[in-house]
Amino acid sequence: MVDIFPSISGVDFEGAWQRRVDVAIDDELTAPFISRQDLLAAKISAGRPQDLADVAALHEAEKHREDAQQQSLPPAPRLMKRRSEGQEEWLKKGGGEGF
């Protein structure tokens, strides 16, 4: 099902049109969709229980996506990141004094 709204609470058309996301439907067809940012603004503005549940679900999905991206790093970059974080912590505790 596709919902088409002549206006959306919390979103101005000009800004939303500039931020739209064009999605390829097939090799010859694309369709513009509202951006994630504007979808969240519209759902928060509507304030209905289902909209607020959708907002929570979208935030949770984003958190899982970020976690998955972090875990998809090869072992070497993860090790370098941990090593860098460890060095920063060591320096905070005064381990770098006198150098």
Image (cartoon, helix red, strand yellow):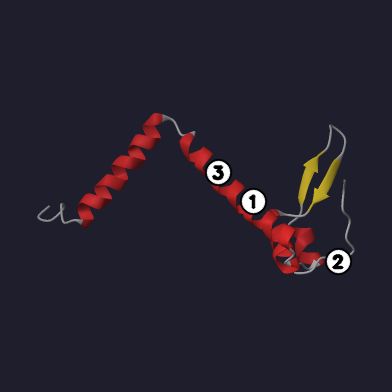
Report whether residue 37 is seen.
no
Quarter of the image for the N terminus: give it.
Answer: top right
Q: Which residue is mark 1?
A: 57
Which badge, 1 or 2, comes first in the chain's sequence?
2
Q: In the figure, residue 42 lies in which quadrant?
A: bottom right
Name above or below for residue 43 compared with residue 79: below
State which tag comes first along the sequence, 2 or 3.
2
- Where residue 83 appears, x then y in whole percent? 29, 41
Cα–Cα gap, marks 2 and 3: 31 Å
Residue 23 position (above or below residue 43): above
Q: Amino acid at mark 3?
A: His
Q: Quadrant of residue 64?
A: top right
Of the two numbered discs 1 and 2 in the rendering, the one whose residue sits closer to the viewer: 1
Label 1 Cα crowd, 10 Å radius (few <14 / some 14-19 / many 20+):
few
Q: Residue 4: which disc?
A: none
| SS type, badge 3 | helix
Q: How busy is the neighbourhood of tag 3: few (under 14 within 10 Å), some, or many (20 plus)? A: few
User: Disc 2 designates what residue?
Assistant: 7
Where residue 3 sits in the image (x, y, percent)?
Answer: 87, 53
- The kind of residue on which mark 1 rests is Ala
The residue under label 3 is 64
Q: Residue at the location (59% across, 50% down)?
A: 60
Count all numbered tags in the image, as a single digit.
Answer: 3
Tell me if residue 26 can be seen. yes
**Residue at the (76%, 59%) spot, across then down:** 18
Q: In the rendering, at what x and y percent does residue 92 appear? A: 22, 57
Q: What residue do we see at 37% from left, 31% from top?
A: 76
